[in-house]
Amino acid sequence: MTTLLLEVMRIRAGKRSAPDVLRRYREDRFSAPAAVPAHRLRAAEDAVVSALPTDFALLTLAPIAPLGTHSALATVDQNKVVSTARGSEVAADPTNALALEAALRRRQSSRTEPKSDDVVRLAAAQRVVRAQQVTGRATFAHFALFGAVSAGRDAGNLAFERQHIVEHLGFAAKATQAAVGGRVEISLTSLTPGFAPVVLAAHDAFEDQHDVEIVGDPHRGTGRGYYLGLCFKVYSVLGDDRIEVGDGGFVDWTRTLLGNRKERLLISGLGIDRLATLSPAR
């Protein structure tokens, strides 16, 4: 099938003239340059990277991932992903590829020490493509996301969850303020009653930070079935404006990849393009 598709693409490409390519470039929303000026994107990304805790390894991800990466791990409809004829797909979210890398590193660690509690912390900025039609403020066909993942082993008493939710929320708040300034609001949605101690840990960690507010969001509709236990959204608050800039939560991806129910994974992401549109002009 791959050989056939490659030949079809070769024939189709051979029938296109240079003017055809230019016309397609003009009309294809996936091909157009970013709407946000490059210097503002660079400044926003630099601000986010500067806020990353030193325990995280910063990676440069490939622009493609194995076919099924987003649908098999994250239950994302394949129609929302740009698939290729070579058994791969264009990156749609850096946390999926980071989860694959984290699983490989966790597997290597467990082979040398079966009950290893070494936590793998990875992060990356990646320009991604989403195939679905989107409308509204600061929504684009392709855009940059900064993703972070923490993968480890269940330590009992929700110790992993309580520690790493505070770490990810702290990074998200610090990065948003570094890029935009102003206040940050983080809404938490508990998906399981047993995660109450994790919610409490988040509230306790930020109770003295007047520029970061933790609020409950029990009626959140999105993310259910995608996240497990607890999820959150990050908002930049500038005057009367409250704009979503990030999202995250616990998922079962490494548990599924490694076939081990003890594996734990927390993911989070920040929209670089969205932060750049909110940041003061430089």
Image (cartoon, grey):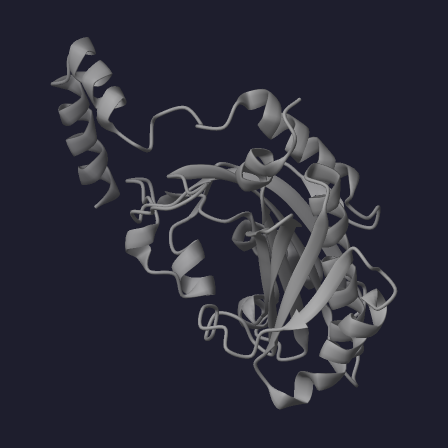
Residue 53's spot in the image, x, y percent? 81, 48
Residue placed furthest toward the front: 240
Residue drawn at the location 44% of the way across and 73% of the way down? 221
Identity of the residue drawn at 59% across and 34% down:
276
Residue 201 position, x and y percent, is: 80, 75
**How many numbered marks have been drawn onto this rendered protein structure?**
0
Decide if residue 242 is on the left or right side of residue 25: right
- Residue 205 sits in which quadrant? bottom right
The one nearer the camera, 4 or 197, is: 197
Residue drawn at x 23%, y 15% as measured from the top left: 22
From the viewer's side, name the closer residue of 22 and 106: 22
Q: Position of residue 34 (x, y in %)?
A: 44, 27
State the residue at coordinates (63%, 25%).
281
Residue lying at the far right of the rendered structure: 208
Name the quadrant of the C terminus.
top right
Is residue 111 visible to us here?
Answer: no
In this orientation, which residue lies closer to the viewer: 256 or 138?
138
Q: Quick check: 5 left or right of 269?
A: left
Residue farthest toward the top in the current orientation of the protein: 18
- Residue 244, percent from left and from top: 55, 53
Res 29 visible: yes
Q: Is residue 234 left or right of residue 199?
A: left
38 shown above or below 278: above
Above or below for 201 versus 44: below
Give left or right: position of 150 versus 77: right
Kindly give the residue lying farthest to the left in the view shown: 15
